[in-house]
Image (cartoon, helix red, strand yellow):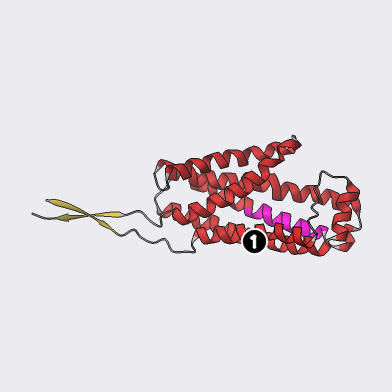
Amino acid sequence: MSNHTTAPARATGGPNPGILGLVSLGLLIGSLVSMAILTGGTITSPFEDTETVAGFFADHGFAASFASMLQLGSAIPLGIYTATVYARQQRLGIRVPGPVIGQFGGTAAAILLAVSAIITWTQSQPTVAANPELTHALAYLSFATGGFAHVLGLGLLVAGIAVPTLLLRLLPAPLAWTGLVIAVLAELSFLTMVFEPVQFLVPIGRFGALVWLVVAGFLLPRGRPRTRHTQGT
């Protein structure tokens, strides 16, 4: 007679993706909160006039530098999260395009967030802030890379995790479906390039995706149980 016993799942090693997601989210929130505190609640948008945008960076150079430092820090655990989850999905036996799509999206999101932080830091330098037109142009570039372009990458990362884990039932179905909804909203954020009123999709996609990645990072199994076959009588 053949008996089936379930062996413990093999551990994948590496850092806990849930913790990595928390660190990335915490640093990003810290960058926004520090900017608000250091500027007395004054936040500018690249869609304002050149004088206003240039004046903001001329008056709040330290605040912009400090916030960009935290934002750059947020990109690092996001990139590590992406690599860790990709390796875990491979260990779980997921051999579909999803993990590769997620890896591409997460890597792009981390790089774009870092580029945006560097551009913001550049704007905060007195010699750059003294040039209003250049400062305004860089503000658009910082918004694009750290806004809708970054969120597009996040959406791909979420979708690359949600779809295969839904099909293989590795995550609770409500969580996986929520991830798909967030991914769609994140991808639609590219409409901001033409339709300014849909800018609200950027923060929804950004923070919705990061919170989802934290939860998924804690719940994603470390391995799949292995079945052993033993002969008995």
Can residue 97 be seen here? The reply is no
Circle 1 residue: 27
Indicate the secondary structure of the residue bearing disc 1. Answer: helix
Q: Assess whether residue 144 is covered by the magenta stretch.
A: no
Q: Nearer the viewer, residue 3 or 17?
A: 17
> Is residue 111 covered in magenta?
yes
**Total label count?**
1
Q: Give the range drawn in magenta.
A: 110-123
Occupied quadrant, residue 168: top left
Q: Relative to 157, is 199 on the left or the right?
A: right
Measuring 59% from the left and 57% from the top, which residue is drawn there?
Answer: 78
Residue 137 point in image, percent of width and height = 84, 48
| Residue at (60% x, 53% y) in the render | 107
Question: Can you give x and y, in whole percent of width and height, for residue 37 in the image?
Answer: 76, 61
Q: Which residue lies furthest to the top in this view?
A: 195
Q: Can residue 209 be seen in this view?
A: yes
- Place residue 155 in its image quadrant: top right
- Residue 12 is situated, as x and y percent measured from the top left of the image, at 42, 61
Farthest residue in the front direction? Answer: 40
Residue 66 found in image quarter: bottom right
Magenta part, dominant SS: helix
Looking at the rendered structure, the kind of residue marked 1 is Leu
Left or right: where 84 falls relative to 33: left
